[in-house]
Amino acid sequence: MRRILLVVMLAVVASIGGCGTGEPSLSPGDLFGEYARTTDVRHDRFPDGGGSSADRLANFASMGTPDQVAGALMRTFDCGDDSCEPSGSVDRAAADFAGADSPILGRSLLVKHRDGSLELVTVYVVQKPDGSARLIDGNGGTYTDLEDFRSHNDVLEHDDTVLTLRNVTSVPGEGALVVVSGHTARVWPWWLAGALAALVIAGAVILTIRRYRAARHPDPLLIPLEFKDRDDD
């Protein structure tokens, strides 16, 4: 019984501990370095034309310093080609916020997925004349800032690692580069975790008491019958 109780308690602790808010340990420079070296980036805006990693690095070097190239990658861009085609949901979200004639700008999020693959995910920025702005994802979800996006989007997961601007709605782009998870982790309220642990402990105690009582006062119907040997008659 003690083993069962120990296993149950460890499972509870593991489940509660697994719902934490751990964030990626990569630095912006580390993740951008992976992007600069990788020749297989989905939806890349700076394709290498099938060259080697060395060719790709040389091409980026010709464009400027790492900071300049990262800045070019993170800045907003006009949606005037095939790499930036807002869906109807995006158009409607932009019109609802800023009006039907407001320009929609693209912005790339550098995403490292759980399997290690890299992808540039396009999101959109729309501004009002007063300078207020919103971030819009590919499904038309609208967000006030990076934390709002991470808390409520349904396009990225917690185990996605994202390089972007902290001020993700800025135009064309300002502020520090940050590496964050694609979605905030679900954090259990302390009272819910405590209640679950209490229920598990209470259930284990009740089970222990019932087994103890059953051992002291066995059910007569479950006691095996004793037959006398017929030769003793």
Image: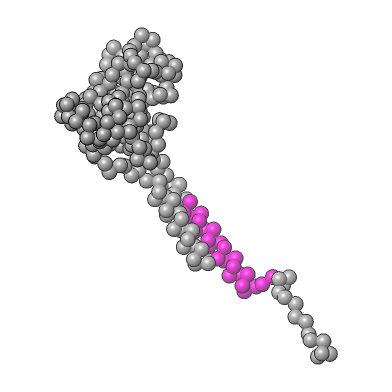
Let me know if residue 104 appears in the view: no
Q: Position of residue 93 (x, y in %)?
A: 41, 18
**Residue 45 location (% of width, % of height):** 30, 24
- Residue 22 placement: quadrant: top left
Residue 68: x percent and y percent?
Answer: 18, 27
Picture quadrant of residue 160: top left
Which sits in the foreground, 64 or 90? 64
Q: Give the prevailing secondary structure in the magenta stretch.
A: helix
Q: Does residue 187 appear in the picture of this structure?
A: yes
Residue at 43% from the left image edge and 31% from the top image edge: 154
Work out whether residue 224 or residue 139 is closer to the camera in this orientation and state it.
139
Q: Residue furthest right?
A: 233
Q: Does residue 86 sit above or below 188 in this rendering?
A: above
Taking the spot 45% from the left edge, 47% from the top edge, the residue there is 192
Left of 67 or right of it: where is 107? Answer: right
Side of 30 relative to 198 (left or right): left
Q: Is residue 203 magenta?
A: yes
The residue lying at 21 percent from left, 28 percent from top is 59
| Segment tinted magenta in the rendering | 196-219
Left or right: residue 197 versus residue 105 is: right
- Residue 210: give x, y in percent of width and height: 60, 65
Give above or below for 31 relative to 216. above
Residue at the (38%, 41%) spot, across then down: 115
Magenta includes 3? no
Towards the viewer: 35 or 104: 35
